[in-house]
Image (cartoon, grey):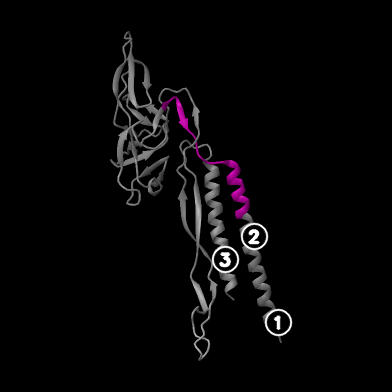
Amino acid sequence: MQALRIAATGMAAQETNVEVISNNIANMRTTGFKKYRAEFQDLLYQSLRREGTSTSTAGTMVPTGVQVGMGVQTAATSRIMSQGSVSITEKELDVAIRGEGFFEIELPDGRTAYTRDGTFERDAEGRIVTVDGFVVQPEMTIPDEARSVTINNEGTVEIILEDDANPVELGRLTLTRFVNKGGLLPIGENLFVETAASGNPQVGNAADEGFGSLLQGYLEESNVDAVTEISDLIAAQRAYEMNSRVISAADEMMASVSNLR
């Protein structure tokens, strides 16, 4: 009986769905996190009677066939890259992106990563780095005698030194965008790396056409909506239960057949 195997694929698919939803809920407070959605597709079909086959010597044809599906499989876990809400932190090195783009980060092994998490700090050398100590690109060093740091919406970084009222420009934070940002590979720590599916990185200045602007003293929150996730979780749970009932029903039917004398 195929029903057992078909229902099993449904249970496996909904188990994946619940895992995706649980990861979204777990990252509700993760800065710059982008939620995921599980997507499914049907499996191959077993044709018991094909459409268009001849049914008589007169040449009549079957208008519709008889096919039995083999179940469901997980096709993808798509990342939803919509803008998250922006919250104020009043910390001078916290920067939120409002619109398109990623910050460029240099990893210790020399690779380039990208992030929407603008929680930046200063390391022992005064460089602007992530909370894990990865250097933000282009590299900028804030001197010890700097009294304040200002980052405008175009990414220009200026400091005011001691006993000097005139700002000094350090450099400019750039943004990077991709043709298919959903094709970026997440590697943890709020970082993504380029893949063949994402396309080549396109570097530009904040507030330019096609790029977002920056907000100093703010951070972008996760785009996870708690109500939506709970609703999806309930629906996935019910779908899992219905597939398990199919297995129970198929088992009872097989038991009835085996008890025939």
Say which element carries label 3: helix
Q: Is residue 221 left or right of residue 162?
A: right
Circle on res. 241: 2
Q: Quickly name the residue at label 3.
A: 8
Question: Which of the two discs, 1 and 3, sits closer to the camera?
Answer: 3
- Return the residue nearer the eye: 152 or 189: 152
**Disc 2 or 3, which lies upstream in sequence?**
3
Which residue: 45% across, 37% down? 32
Q: Horizontally, is 69 left or right of 121 in the view?
A: right
Tell which circle, 1 or 3, labels the residue nearer the N-terminal end: 3
**207 over 75 or under it: above or below:** above
Question: Residue shown at 48%/70% (left/top)?
Answer: 44
Mark 3 nearby-residue class (10 Å; few <14, some 14–19, many ≥20): some
Tell me residue 135's x, y (percent).
33, 33
The amino acid beneath tag 3 is Ala
Indicate the secondary structure of the residue bearing disc 1.
loop
* Number of numbered discs visible in the structure rendering: 3
Instruction: Check the picture and name the quadrant holding the C terminus.
Output: bottom right
Residue type marked 2:
Glu
Q: CA distance from mark 2 to mark 3?
A: 11 Å
132 to the left or right of 53: left
Q: Residue at x 62, y 53 (%)?
A: 235
The front one of 108 and 205 is: 205
Q: Which residues are magenta?
A: 215-236
Q: The N terminus is located in which quarter? A: bottom right
The residue under label 1 is: 259
Residue 252 location, x and y as percent?
Answer: 68, 73
